[in-house]
């Protein structure tokens, strides 16, 4: 899945995570760490995948990430998710991260990524998702 060079104009998908960016999550430049953002996006994608399948899920790939703008301390960070593919044991989602600067004004898309999760059994082995449409 190719991520667009320019961000979408409105959030696509369902709201899966909303959190405030805090000072402890900043890098030396004063922006929020990309790894922190990736973690929030992974939580959002897994939450959506689990709620859709009803099965435990493990992240198996982050196929693409595109950072459009930095996230600042105090920004309201929202991750929106949408399913793009369901396989025999895996599910792929697009995760968009949107912010409102200091929780005010119009939201803007700052990051988009493609995440793939695999359904897991008790021993961690892949299990079939079943016939669930998206």
Image: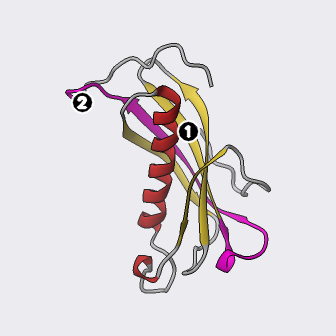
Read off the residue under disc 2.
Answer: 124
Residue 61 pos. (x, y %): 41, 41
Residues rendered magenta in the picture: 99-123
User: Looking at this rendering, what residue extends furthest in the left direction?
Assistant: 123
**Tags 2 and 1 touching, CB below 8 Å:** no
Callout 2 crowding tier (Cα within 10 Å): few <14, some 14–19, many ≥20: few
| Point 45% across, 72% down: residue | 33
* Numbered disc 1: secondary structure: strand
In the picture as drawn, the residue positioned furthest to the bottom comes out as 29
Circle 1 packing at 10 Å, graded few (<14), some (14-19), many (20+), is many
> Which image quarter is the N terminus in?
top right
The disc at residue 93 is 1
Q: Is residue 6 above or below residue 77?
A: above
Q: Residue at x 45, y 42 (%)?
A: 46
- Residue 24 among those drawn in magenta: no
Residue depicted at 31% across the width and 24% down the height = 126
Residue 74 x %, y %: 57, 80
Residue 40 — which label? none
């Amino acid at each position: 899945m190719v991520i667009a060079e320019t961000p979408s104009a409105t959030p696509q998908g369902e709201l899966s995570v909303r959190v405030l960016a805090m000072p402890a999550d900043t890098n030396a430049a004063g922006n929020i760490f990309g790894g922190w953002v990736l973690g929030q996006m992974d939580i959002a994608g897994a939450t959506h995948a689990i709620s859709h399948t009803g099965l435990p899920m493990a992240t198996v790939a982050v196929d693409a990430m595109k950072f459009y703008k930095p996230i600042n301390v105090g920004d309201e960070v929202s991750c929106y998710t949408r399913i793009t593919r369901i396989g025999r044991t895996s599910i792929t989602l697009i995760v968009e991260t949107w912010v409102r600067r200091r929780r005010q004004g119009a939201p803007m898309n700052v990051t988009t990524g493609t995440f793939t999760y695999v359904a897991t059994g008790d021993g961690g082995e892949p299990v079939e998702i079943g016939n669930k449409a998206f």
